[in-house]
Image (tube, rainbow, N blue to C red):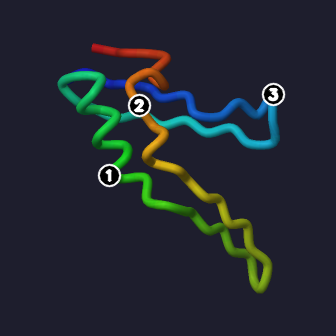
């Protein structure tokens, strides 16, 4: 198994940065695993305030991998 790092947002160029690391046999398998795990949103709540972040898992591919570790 290899460890694949995905870079999916850059907070130095925009308002949100997003990355993920997934273990898989191939880059394509890693992308599929991440698409399956990501869901469509994440919520951060503090009392009655919240931040909602939405994801488009269909847009994630092996092309988003920027680092591979053995």
| Residue 2 screen position, x and y as percent | 25, 21
Residue tagged by mark 1?
36
| Residue 64 screen position, x and y as percent | 48, 25
Q: In this view, does 60 lie to the left or right of 52?
A: left
Residue tagged by mark 2?
61
- Of labels 2 and 1, earlier in sequence is 1
Above or below residue 56? Residue 11 is: above
Above or below residue 36? Residue 18 is: above
Residue tagged by mark 3?
13
| Residue 66 screen position, x and y as percent | 49, 17
- Which quarter of the figure has residue 63? top left
- Of labels 1 and 3, earlier in sequence is 3
Disc 3 is placed on an element classified as loop
| Between marks 2 and 1 in the image, the one whose residue lies nearer the viewer | 2
For the residues labelled 2 and 1, say whether their Cβ atoms are less than 8 Å apart. no
Report how far apart the C-alphas of labels 2 and 1 lie in the structure: 12 Å
- Say which quadrant the C terminus sits in: top left
| Residue 47 screen position, x and y as percent | 75, 83
Above or below residue 62? Residue 43 is: below
């Amino acid at each position: 198994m290899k460890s694949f790092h995905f870079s999916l947002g850059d907070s130095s160029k925009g308002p949100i940065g997003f990355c993920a690391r997934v273990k898989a046999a191939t880059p394509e398998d890693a992308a599929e695993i991440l698409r399956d795990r990501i869901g469509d949103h994440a919520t951060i709540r503090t009392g009655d305030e919240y931040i909602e972040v939405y994801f488009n898992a269909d847009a994630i591919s092996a092309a988003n991998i920027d680092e591979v570790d053995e």
